[in-house]
Image (tube, helix red, strand yellow):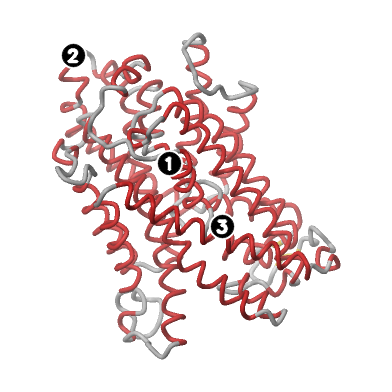
Amino acid sequence: MSVASKLLRHKSVEQLQAEAGKRGDFRRVLGLWQLTAIGIGGIIGVGVFVLAGQQAALNAGPAVALSFLIAGIASAAAALCYAEFAGMIPVTGSAYTYGYAVLGELAAWLIGWDLLLEYALIVAVVAIGWSGYVQSALASMGMDLPVWAKGAIGTGEGHVFNVVAALVTLGVSALLIFRTEWGARFNTLVVAIKVAAVALVIGIGAFYVNPSNWVPFIPARVVGPDGIGHFGFQGVASAAAVVFFAVFGYDTLTTAAEESKNPQRDLPRAVLLSLGISMAMYLAVSLVLTGIAHYSTLKTDAPVADAFKGLGLHWVALTVSVSAVFGLISVLFAFMLGATRIWFALARDGLLPGWFAKVHPRYGTPHRPTIVLGVFTALVAGLLPIEEVAKLVNIGVLSAFIVICSSVLLLRKRKPDLHRSFRTPLVPLIPLIGIGFSIWLLAELPLITWKVFLIWVSLGLVVYFAYGIRHSKLEKGA
């Protein structure tokens, strides 16, 4: 077999479908609402509690709702494509597995390799943000941490290591090592608390909305002394590129395909339900938040809580802060679960050492990649500032969106009669919208993101040609 043939070899959809029913690596314990909770847990978090207010103050004004809508359109187009694949190929690995079936081994390896880094970095970013909330709460109770333990070097005088951020990533890893249903039940409870808090914000805030705060809806474009522009439609677009970080996460639930009780029915429904519920909440919170407080006052670390403090509703502010502390744990859970399942899938296919493709004999979970990723994310969260990590988190997911949308187009052409439990509507329009928006948002990312991405891809190519191409299960089959 030539090198080119090896790079393009793939598992057929029919082969993957046949294998899906025979797989016994995981225990099938997740129902529709537990899968939906994983998706909502991955989506609702920093976007509601932080980004909506901050981007209103910095770039979009009240039109931050429009920014979420733009980002949501891109995400919804990809979600519809994910739903088609999730119902058709109910196998652990998400975009990596779907790419393997359509685009071939090298493309699949690169997207899996990229998502490993992206998901791990998202865990680190959220853990650092979570640490800030917890430290603030501890300080208010007179339980201040030692200076060296408050943050990474460069985040404050005397800071050495963010202990709280590191501990929460290790705690979530431990939760994922034990039975999947235990973690899923805990996650569902946390998501319910978070959704209730968002509903409270919308329900109470609606009575305090002052429509004059929405005028002008899109503030006039201004350029600051540093030469950086804000507001206008360009500002709305810039905010959309930032808040896109907050409108994906449903893809993590597709990595748990082999732990779903009825994946071909439930996975497509859970993808669409989780994104639909989350987008409705984002749009409502954006409008309420900019309606109860002028957008210029929302540039704070906790804009939702601070807006209610400004109304004298301190009990709502406290409820939101407590819910944010609990709610962000579900984001950690969703993305750590996604990372570990992709690593397991890569190892099971032979592209990484098979030692990682063994599940725990008692708990039935991929404990080895979970332990390694837990330690890695703990070190990143403890040692690096949030700004440096946050710059790196979107590029791999956007690349995955392009792969998924392109794969739907290719597979519809190659195998139009293949059974699909869910069909993406308006093909080729919907996949092309997903591809176009993803390319646009990729162009909005800073140069440092591209540099790190290229370094990571180069390292991935080294690993693939040094190990994966020779140890692939398809190589052994050939």
> On the image, numbered disc 2 is attached to which residue?
478
Coordinates of residue 224 in the picture (x, y in percent): 69, 69
Q: Real-space Cα distance between discs 2 and 1?
A: 32 Å
> On the image, numbered disc 1 is attached to which residue?
253
Image-quadrant location for residue 19: top left
The crowd level at tag 1 (other Cα within 10 Å; few <14, some 14-19, many 20+) is: many
Q: Nearer the viewer, mark 3 or mark 2?
A: 3
Q: Secondary structure under badge 2?
A: loop
What residue is drawn where x is 38% and y is 54%? 333
Going by the numbered disc 1, the residue's amino acid type is Leu
Q: Is residue 204 left or right of residue 323?
A: right
Asked whether the viewer can see residue 229, the reply is: no
Q: Which of marks 2 and 1 is nearer the N terminus?
A: 1
Q: Which mark is residue 195?
A: 3
Along the viewing direction, whichever of 28 and 23 lies nearer the viewer:
28
Along the viewing direction, whichever of 203 and 451 lies nearer the viewer:
203
Coordinates of residue 434 in the picture (x, y in percent): 58, 34
Q: Real-space Cα distance between discs 3 and 2?
A: 50 Å
Asked whether the viewer can see residue 318, the reply is: yes
Q: Which of marks 3 and 2 is nearer the N terminus?
A: 3
What residue is drawn where x is 64% and y is 53%? 281
Coordinates of residue 381 in the picture (x, y in percent): 34, 65
The crowd level at tag 2 (other Cα within 10 Å; few <14, some 14-19, many 20+) is: few
Say if mark 3 contacts mark 1, CB within 8 Å.
no
Going by the numbered disc 2, the residue's amino acid type is Ala
Going by the numbered disc 3, the residue's amino acid type is Val
